[in-house]
Amino acid sequence: MAVIRIIGIDPGLRNTGWGVIAQEGSRLSYVADGAVHSDPDKSLAERLLQIHAQLMDILKLHAPDEAAVEETFVNTDARATLKLGQARGVVMLAPAMLNIPVSEYAPNMIKKTVVGAGHAEKDQVKHMVKLLLPKAQMRTADSTDALAIAICHAHHRGSQNLAKILARS
């Protein structure tokens, strides 16, 4: 059975979390996690470039087969939502540039998949990530979320692939 490497990415303008797991059948194992950061004193364009460059290094180092990104939720601050959307665009561009397929998941879908409840608290998500990936470092809250995104993708990727095959038929 083939081993598939999945990178989960939790986009953010200040901190973008990432987590890499391996999936062999239904078995998941931890590979690595961390976060990339941008300098808040730089312009928006420079910060986006920082995120992109650091993420490209991570992608080249860990060579994932597939990527999963959390969808942006709209909050009351339109400017913050716009900036997050721009960071998310850069985060989605990086794996696409390396021909790595990118899937997207809503925050509630991620929580429901990992914890069993769509409105789970961060501590519940962290606890379940640790149970599912006992060797996980979970270096930051953002990288813990990224590992949860990767786990979510591992659970849903089979049905996504089947849907693509059926759509081509």
Image (cartoon, grey):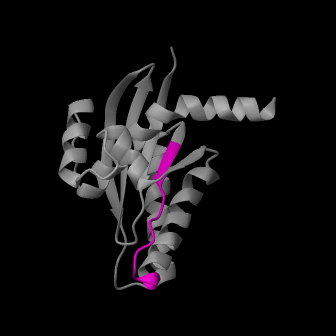
Closer-to-camera residue (32/84) = 84
Residue 29 lies in what quarter of the image? top left
Where is residue 112 shown, x and y percent of the image?
A: 36, 43
Q: Residue furthest top?
A: 1
Give left or right: position of 122 versus 161: left
Q: Magenta part of the protein: which range?
A: 67-79
Q: Residue furthest right?
A: 169
Q: Quadrant of the C terminus?
A: top right
Where is residue 151 shown, x and y percent of the image?
A: 38, 37
Residue depicted at 42% across the width and 47% down the height = 109
Where is residue 56 shown, x and y percent of the image?
A: 50, 55
Give left or right: position of 79 versus 121: right
Residue depicted at 45% across the width and 76% down the height = 81
Where is residue 95 shown, x and y percent of the image?
A: 56, 51
Residue depicted at 45% across the width and 57% down the height = 55
Does 47 appear in magenta?
no
Q: Is residue 133 visible?
A: no
Closer-to-camera residue (48/11) = 11
Residue 166 lies in what quarter of the image? top right
Q: Is residue 24 visible?
A: yes
| Whether residue 49 is situated above or below residue 58 in the rendered picture | below
Does 78 appear in magenta?
yes
Closer-to-camera residue (129/136) = 129
Give left or right: position of 45 versus 19: right
Residue depicted at 55% across the width and 57% down the height = 92
